[in-house]
Image: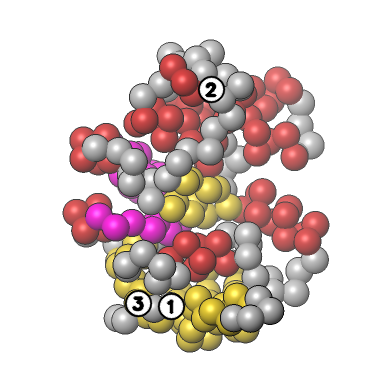
Amino acid sequence: MIQLNNIEKVYRTDSIETLALSGINLQVQKGEFLSIMGPSGCGKSTLLNIMGLLDKPTAGELKLDGQAVNDFHDRRMASLRNHKIGFVFQSYHLVNDLSVVDNVEIPLIYRSMSGKERRSLALGALEKVGLNARTKHFPSQLSGGQRQRVAIARAIVGNPEIILADEPTGNLDSIMGQEILEILKKLVNEMGTTIVMVTHDDNIALQTDRIVRLFDGSQVN
């Protein structure tokens, strides 16, 4: 589902060059739940952003579902990202002025469908994460765990094949973190979703199919 061949990422300014990733070779199979671990600043989020088409590698090749995407123009990249990939972030990134159901609908605004269809899909996604009784609430009225459930519902509302999760349990206690992990595992087991998750938590990572470790921008296993 995801293939990275000799990926390198360099950030350059007028006075300094920073090597964020070097020689990354990685294959993620369809329906796999993969964890990426490593110390802060080792390139985990950069790697996730490249997989999610939010950033482009300086060198190397990225393939999604067997298709090389490096040279796609921005509009085609955005369409692919909207239809194929869902994102879950540590800090939720919910819009405080929108209700829960309106937040979940956001990715569907960029698709050709009616408001009624968007609402139906959003309600269905919220039911999958156990929040069908909170649809009219606002993010400020929810706990951290509930906000992350909304973020997951938003990520899955368009039925993406891939979910990229950047520290999805990082702001939660161990009980809530485990609840979020169980939702992600259910997506893998019941829907065949491919999930790549950045985490610092060994207990969380050990419950996934495989762990890839980074150090100073390189794979160490």
Mark toward the start of the polypeptide (2 vs 1): 2
Front residue of this view, candidates 129 and 11: 11
Q: Label 1: which residue?
A: 217
- At horizontal 58% and vertical 82% (from top left) the residue drawn is 17
Q: Is residue 200 magenta?
A: yes
In the image, 95: left or right of 172?
Answer: right
Percent position (x, y) of residue 1?
Answer: 52, 66
> Which stretch appears magenta?
179-201
Give the vertical position of 13 relative to 110 (above or below): below
Q: Residues within 10 Å of mark 1 (few under 14, many from 20)?
A: many
Can you tell which of label 2 and label 1 is closer to the viewer?
A: 1
In front of the other: 39 or 186: 39
Q: Position of residue 18 (x, y in %)?
A: 54, 79
Examine the image and state in which quarter residue 184 appears.
Answer: top left
Where is residue 84 shown, x and y percent of the image?
61, 53
Residue 37, compared with residue 156, is above or below; it is: below
Say whether residue 10 is magenta: no
Measured Cα–Cα span from mark 2 to mark 3: 38 Å
Q: Name the element at disc 2.
A: helix
Query: Could you say whether the residue bearing mark 1 is in a helix, strand or loop?
Result: loop
Residue 128 visible in this rendered orientation of the protein: no
For residue 62, above or below residue 135: below
Q: Quadrant of residue 148?
A: top left
Mark 2 or mark 3, which is nearer to you? 3
In contact (CB < 8 Å): disc 3 and disc 1: yes
- Residue tagged 3: 215
What residue do we see at 80% from left, 66% from top? 73
- The residue carrying mark 2 is 100
Q: Are marks 2 and 3 in contact (CB under 8 Å)?
A: no
Hey, what amino acid is under mark 2?
Answer: Val
Regarding mark 3 in the picture, which secondary structure is present there?
A: strand
Q: What whole-number distance in Å separates the C-alpha atoms at marks 2 and 1?
A: 37 Å
